[in-house]
Structure formats: C-alpha cells, structure tokens
Amino acid sequence: MSTAEHDRLAESDDPRAAWRRWGPYVSARQWGTVREDYSADGDAWRSFPFDHSHLRAYRWGEDGLAGVCDVDGFLTLGLALWNGRDDRLKERLFGLTNPQGNHGEDVKEYWWALEGTPTHSYASWLYRYPQAAFPYEELVRVNGERRVVEEEYELADTGVLDEDRFFDVQVTHAKAGPGDLCVEVTATNHGPDAAPLHLVPQLWFRNTWSWGLDDRRPRLWAGEQGEGYAEVLAEHHALGRVRLTAEGGAGAEGMVPALVFCDNDTQLATLYGPDAVPDGASAHPKDAVGRAVVHGQVDAGNPAGTGTKVGLWWDLGEVGPGASVTVRLRLAEAEAGSGPSGAPAFDEVLAARAQECEEFYAAVIPAGTGEQDVLIARRAFAGLQWGKQLYLYDVPRWIEGDPGQPPPPPGRHTRQTGRNTRWRHVNLAEVISMPDEWEYPWFATWDLAFHCVALAHVDPFFAKWQLLLMCREWVMNPNGQLAAYEWNFSDVNPPVHPWAAWQVYSIDGGRDRDFLERIVLKMLLNFPWWVNRKDSEGSDVFEGGFLGMDNVGLFDRSEALPGGQRLEQADATAWMGMFCLKMLRMSAELARHDPAWDEVSTKFLVHFLSIAQALDDFGTHHTSLWDADDEFFHDVLVDEDGTAHRMPVRSMVGLLPLAGISLVPDWVATELPDLTDFFQGWTERRPELADALIHTNHRGDARRTLSLVSRDQWSALLRPLLDEAEFLSPHGIRSLSAAHRDGVGAHVDGADLSLRYVPGESDSGMFGGNSNWRGPVWMPVNALLLDALRIYGRGAGAGVEVEYPTGSGRRTGMPQVAHEIEERLVSLFRPGPDGRRPGTPRHHPRGPLWDGHPTFSEYFHGDDGRGLGASHQTGWTALVAHFICAPDGIPNR
C-alpha cells in the first residue's frame, strides 16, 4: 500500500518514533484507578474520588477531554468547557464509581471518536455538552436508589438533553509535522435558543516535582501577544521549548483568550484545611482556572503570568441556535516553527491531513465495502487510536511510596493484604491500547490480544509491539505468568496471546519472522506456568479459574473452593489446547527456515494430543468433560477423594473446545519430515491419541485437521450453537444458552447454587455486578468461534452441510454458516429501516444527531442486541472492523 500515512508508518517502526511522539495518549479517567490509590483498604474509588480530581495532583498520569500529550506524558493539551450554569469547569468525563452504580461503574456522558490515523497525523473527537447544569448529584442519587434488576439512570434520562439543548464540541488534530500539531475546536449549538459558552483549552505539565524524586520544575509563561493571537511558551528539561499559539476562528474572529496561569499542584487548603498548607506551597494550585472561570475569582490565577498549568479562556457569550464558533491552537516544538498559526497554513494542514486520512482508509478497507460498513470500520479504528493511553506504573515505587509524601499504610507490603506485591518487577511507562477510555483505563492482557487483531489492519507494528510488550521483562512475571489487569495482576486471563499473534502475523502478510520468533520464545516461558500452576494433578485438564468470563459459572471461579475441591474447567482445557495448536503452527512456520524449530513443533503436538485425550478421560474415576447424555462439555467439580460432579450449565465454557482446531498445511509432509515421522511413530505407540487428527478427502484434495473435538462432538455441538432457542441470537452467539431462561442449578458442598439466562445487564453481584457472561453477546469469543468454524469448513468439515439455523430445514456449508453469523454481528452496528442501530444503547435518543454515530459497547443484549456495559469498548468490540476488512477470515496459511 502506498499512501502518505503508510509512508509515515514505514518510518515509525519504533514506539518512540518521531510521528508517534505526540498523540491522544491522555486517559479519560485517572481518578479511581489502582495507581492513584494509597489507601489502607485498597478501595481505589473512595481513595481518589471524582470530586477530588480537580483539586489533587495525580501521581501516575493525567486525564482530560480530547487530551494530547508527548509520549512521556510530560506536557498535556486538553479541553475544558463551561456553560455558565455548571458548578465546576467541565475538564473531564463524569461517571459513577463501582459502588455507586447499580451495575458497577458507569460513565454518564456522550462522546464519539470520529477519526484517527495510526501516527495521529489526523484525528477528530466529538463531545456532547449539555446547556443546562450538569446533573452530577441527580445521577449519583437516582442510581444509588435503583436495584440491580432495574435499568441504569443515564444522562439522557434526566431531560437535560431534551430539544437538543446541547453543544456538539468537535476537536480536530492535524500534524503539520511530527512536532507541530494544529488543533481546531468547533462548538455548535443544536438547541432552539441562544446559550452561553466558554471554551477553555488548558496546557499543563504532569506533576513530577512533588514526590521527592526530582525537584526540577518546568515552566509555562506568556509569550508574544499579537493582534488576534496569544502565545504561551513551555520549557521542560526533556522536551526543551514548546510553543502554544491561540486565535479565534470562525464565529470568534479576532478574539484572543485570557490566560489564567497556576500550578499543577494539589489544592491543600480546600481538601485538608489551611493548616495543611506548608511553607513554600503554591499559592495558585491546579483548580485556579476553574475558580476564575466558574466562580469569578479573578485573582485565583498567578498574576505573574507563569506556572505549570495555564487555561486559555474564551468567553464566547451567547451562541445562537444553529450557530458554530471555532478556536484554533498550534502546539509546536521549538524547531518545528515559530509565530502564530497563520490561517491559510492552518487550513492547508487540516485539509491535507483529512484527505490523507481518506486515502489511507480507502487502501485499508476492501474496495466494494458498503458505505455504512466503511463508516463502522473507520469509527472502530478511530476508537482504537483514541484508546491508546500512556500507562505509568512503577509497582515497587507505588508500594513503597515516595520520599516527599506520607508513607503508604504497612498493609500494602504484605502478600496477604497488599495488591500486586508479587509483581514488584513491573515498571511500565508505555503507550498501551486500553479496553475502554473511561471504564477500563488500564490494560487487560486478554482484551489487548483482541485489540491487536483489529489494530493489525492499520498499524501492524503497534499491534506486534503490544503483544510483545506484555511478554517483556518489566511486565511478564519471572515465573512466566502474564499480568491480568491492574486490580489484580495475579488473576488469570485466557491464554489468547498465541492465537492473536498468529492472526497479526497473517494479517501483516506472513513475513515478519522476527516477530514470530520473539513471541514463540516468550510463550515458551508462559506455557510452563500454565502446566505447573494450573494442572494440579498433571492430568492435562486445567483449572484456570477466572479466565475472563467473570460470572459465567454457578460460583466465583476466582475464589478457592470449599473442602479442598478443584474445578476442572472445559474452557481452561480448551484454551490450552488452542495454545498448543497455535504454538505448533507458529513453530512449524519457523521450522521451514530453521530446522531447530521442528522439535518445538513436536513438543506442542505431544501436549495437544494429551489434552485432546484428557478432555474425554481424566482422573482415577475416568471422568470426561464431555457429557454424552447432554452432548455438551461441562466443568467438573472434583472432591479430594476423586469423586466428580459435572456442572450442568450450557455456556460459552462448553463451546470453547471448538476453538481447539487447526489445519495441517500440505507442506508439512515434505518440508518437515521429522515432525511427520514423529507423529506417525508416536500414534503407532499410542493409537488412542490419533483420534485428534481428522483426515478428509474433499474433491480429491486430502486434508488433515487437528481438533480437540471429534466429528461426532462437532456435529452435536453445532446443534445448540446454531439453535436460535439456545446460543444463536439475532446478533451473534450468546454466552449462555437461552434454554436456561428458567434457571439451572446444582447442589455443591451442602449449598444449592443456580443461575439463569440473563440477556441484559447482570443480576449477579459477582465481580462488582458490572459484568455479565450469563446471556449477552461478546465480540471476542464470537471471533474465536468464527475462526474455528472457518478452519473446520476448510478441513474436517469441507463439503459438509449443516442445518442453519437448527430446526429450520435449511442446510448449508460451514463457510456460509460462519459468514452469516459474522453478518449478524456486524448488523449490530448497521442502521435499520428506522435509522436505529441494534447495538445502540437504549438510552441514546433517536434522531439524525444520534443515529449517525455507531457505538461500541462492551457486550450486547442476547435477545435484541442493544449495547450494554462499558460504552466505548473500541478495544475488543473493534473486532467488527476486522470482520469488515477480512470478511472471510484470515487464511490459516
């Protein structure tokens, strides 16, 4: 591909490359994160609540609206707003904490990522700002009064957006060069009446001087003030000198912002009382801009015109109905240019980068893709770009505390009460793709693996770097475990890294052997951790625990089981079977050029064959995870004496063994004779293992498929999978069979446990009540199943027709089945006859100002498809762009 953006990407094969140096790496929420929690009880939400966010300096990052910063996060440019009615400056997105929400944490704002190129040469973001006072207290109070069985109370439910009484504020970034960023902010009044508006972009340095580690203080000061423009200069020991120029644009011609300087220091007096303010503390702490704009305290800012934070304050007065106003900023490194942003040059930069963005996505998205699908894919890719975040977390420093601050409570140090104490090697200062901008502003390793599959279509280098980063020495545990997520690095995520690595390698053209070697070597360290820690009996049946699917079971799988029992998990075993197959496939690919890898292939072939056998027969009682009567895979609870109790739940847990499948390429027989000979000799000695290899001859073409699941089991599992009364919903595969609408239960250790199909928000308090794998459609596991169906259709199931949907009498081949399920998933984002998209959350109003924007929810209602959970999950929900860009899947080369 040859476009200007592809050329920039070719120069950017380093995470700190010039074109990657500035980007939208600022979190949407830093408060309430584990990193900012220095409490005794580990309650991050209460340790640093929203009401402190405008008063306290953050230790490990920053947050803001449409924020852009350098790759180290030293200097940030973000937007603030005031509608003349709010009790505070709108500097960041608001939402409920986990204890406040009736379904866990929940953002209460509306915004969309509109555009984004991988080098951040062009980006656009839209925020919907109410003209009435933002109903902070009402949202907290009403949600607090609601029960778990009730719907969440959302911003639109309050009435403040009725009659379109809001401003749409669009922020557009366009780089004139790697260190020269043009920013345009346009606010449009969609309401029927004129309404006041203040635009207050802010520039500030991250506080690195208050912790007793580095007393160097950067500086901002007023520079040249010319006719129609204002200038702020910034100087930092690492960045050098940076210049910000500001001018009024359309609707604000000639308007120059007032400059309010202060320091990005904690407002000690307000938080802790005047006696808590030590000598030498800043007299103008970080809330000074808000006090000046909102509360009229004109002396709140530093009259000397200097500090470490500055607000550029445009009071735009009354903006008429339908009218728009624009302001412009240019942030440039000293060598990138000088003087104010001349309008023609600014316009030329925006126009050029917008056109290059069009050309880039025209090259990425297949020709002939429908207009709506192009929009969906581009919005998903934009969300992935805006979802990149600078993630700072030095765990030993966080545990021990800083010399310039009070010491953290002793409980942080102990393995019994301290969080992440087994991960003292972690020291992260990297840009990482986040699951969701607000609700999950921290990486989760298995989420990230799925992000990378979508990212590989637009930025293969970044996708590969993200997968490798999770395996680097400053992240991966020395024992080989991958970190789960910051609330508990030790929790266990599904081992999807090898699957994702193979997908990314293939999307990138199957040419980066260096990446393949590096990821396989790291997975050779991760695999023994699973074998040694999660196969306690050495039976090749695994007890992974949590495994990402939160409340999918009858009880919390993260917790120890009573009475010394263990849970042998169908999904954990399936994940490990898939792990082995992808390692086998990748090492075989490497062995084509280096015979030493042949033995690695052999290792994972042996492991896979053993796992495949163990699924059907393990333990002293020869228990099978396959229930021959129910014709489904189930978890098995095993007592200390070996007695087994099968959990009678039909869930995604029992479908995941389908993902343990791989084609054996034709070239293996001729190019890897040692592997071929070994397999033949091994299965001659142990013929019971040969069942995992399925031979097929389709139209004279001999095909071999390795599969955890036999032909008969495949046939049996496809019936409920494709049954609309069970797993097949109008918009993808459900996580729990709808056959459990009336509930299913088991008697465990003297207790009666039960669950039921819940198509929407969770009615379980497990995991804070904000996760639901008991019915909704989740994009990541659907992607795995689609991949499995296509592999089966090219191999063991070639030429086989199945009933689709079950009970319909219509029969079709596996490739068509996969295609039609994929279409159901993509349909979540396509507008229907009424303009409404099925995956739009119910609380989004209807109409042209809303229906044109697809949303990317965490999961989707199992019956009607409406979006649920986190509202900006252009992490793994961005897989829809992968479906659109690779409609027939990635060939298993």
Image (cartoon, rainbow, N blue to C red):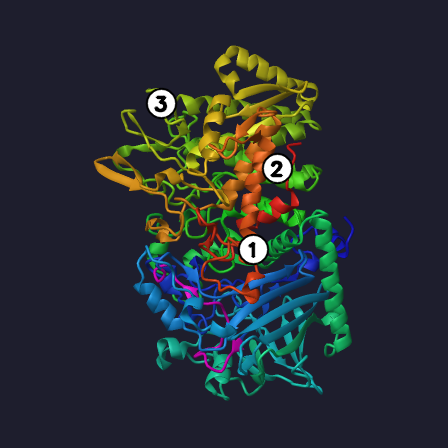
Query: Vertically, is 426 above or below 71?
Result: above
Q: Is residue 578 magenta?
A: no
Tell me which label, 1 or 2, sits earlier in the chain: 2
In this view, the residue in front, 417 or 567, is 567
Residue that numbered label 3 is attached to: 623
Query: Vertically, is 188 above or below 494?
Result: below
Residue 289 locus on image (x, y percent): 51, 80
Mark 2 falls on what kind of element? Answer: helix
Kind of residue sitting beneath label 2: Trp
Residue that numbered label 2 is attached to: 502
Residue that numbered label 1 is attached to: 833
Question: From which residue to which does the magenta span run?
Answer: 81-101
Give the mark toward the camera: 1 or 2.
1
In this view, the residue in front, 51 or 285, is 51
Mark 3 falls on what kind of element? Answer: loop
What residue is drawn where x is 66% and y is 18%? 673
What residue is drawn where x is 71% and y is 48%? 368
Kind of residue sitting beneath label 1: Pro
Residue 738 locus on image (x, y percent): 39, 40
Kind of residue sitting beneath label 3: Thr
